[in-house]
Image (spheres, rainbow, N blue to C red):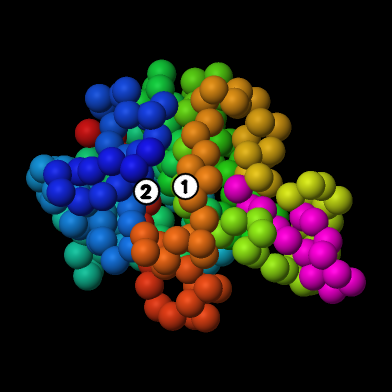
Amino acid sequence: MLTQVENLPIIQAPQLQRFDWLLHGFGLKDISIEDYLRAAGLKNPVIPKTHQSHGNTVHVCSHHDLRLPAGSLAGSTNPVLEGDVFVTNQPGIVCWVRSADCLPILLADRKNKAVAAVHAGWRGTAQKAILAAIETMQKQFHTQTSDVIAALGPAIGGRCYHVGSDVVQIFKKSGLYPNPWLEQVDPTHWYLDIAYANLHLLEEAGLTKENIYLSLACTACDLEKFHSFRREKGKRGEQVSFILVR
């Protein structure tokens, strides 16, 4: 649902909006994470430095491991977290990802007040990064899937995303093909719907439909709001998605 943080447009999931202990959103293009957090009135949030590697590596973010005192802003001397899944239950630490066609996913454990942000392109989807996030939350925070709310943000839509047989073979090895989120259109190309595939993984993990928000926005179809790596032929640009415990 498109709304605003102060005067900045943002997409938020109604299922997450009702929790006053967290802040979340799927950003629009060219608006930085700092801009959104400043507009929300947060004072000195911890924004980990990250490098997304298109996999399923999980980082459990804490003030101690980030070598930051609570309330500090991450700077150039802080460690760079290499991965695509970031989880925490500590207030003030921002779990966030960048995307420009890949699927951003935000998770919240409404009972234990833990959150996660996941970056899932085709590689992360095939490696089931979303399940790695949930499994980590279960181990670290005693999360039950019945308490998890998931929000799937804007990504390239299935009819806009062509992939080749190399991608299909990787999905086949992961047990994710044949399935309806991969539709063959000619002998060497398929449509891939990464949101549909991750929705299936969430339901397979035990989440119910009412606890899952799906934005349905296609980054390739709406260049006014989003950057699309494929539609813009590799042009540099992105949008941010984030969640944190206040």
Q: Which residues are magenta?
A: 182-195
Q: Main SS type for the magenta part?
A: strand
Quadrant housing residue 71: top left
Tell which of 25 and 28 is nearer to you. Answer: 28
Mark 1 lies on a secondary structure that is: loop
Which of these two is toward me, 80 or 178?
A: 178
Q: Residue at x 52, y 39 (%)?
A: 214
Q: How many marks?
A: 2
Question: What is the quadrant of residue 240 in the picture?
Answer: bottom left
- Can residue 164 be seen in the rendering of this structure? yes
Q: Amino acid at mark 1?
A: Gly
- Residue at the disc numbered 1: 153
Query: Which residue is denoted by mark 2 in the rendering?
Result: 26
- Residue 182 left/right relative to 91: right
Residue at 59% across, 56% down: 157
Please state if 8 lies on the left or on the right of 238 as rendered: left
Q: Position of residue 54 (x, y in %)?
A: 56, 64
Q: How many angstroms separate mark 2 from mark 1 (CA)?
A: 6 Å
Q: Is residue 52 visible?
A: no
Q: Tell me the amino acid under the disc marked 2.
A: Phe
Residue at 52% in and 81% down = 233
Considering depth in this image, is 120 or 8 the residue closer to the camera? 8
Expressed as whole percent of the image width and height from the top left, the position of residue 4 reads 23, 43
Query: Quick check: 198 above or below 212?
Result: below
In the depicted structure, whether residue 136 falls above or below residue 86: above
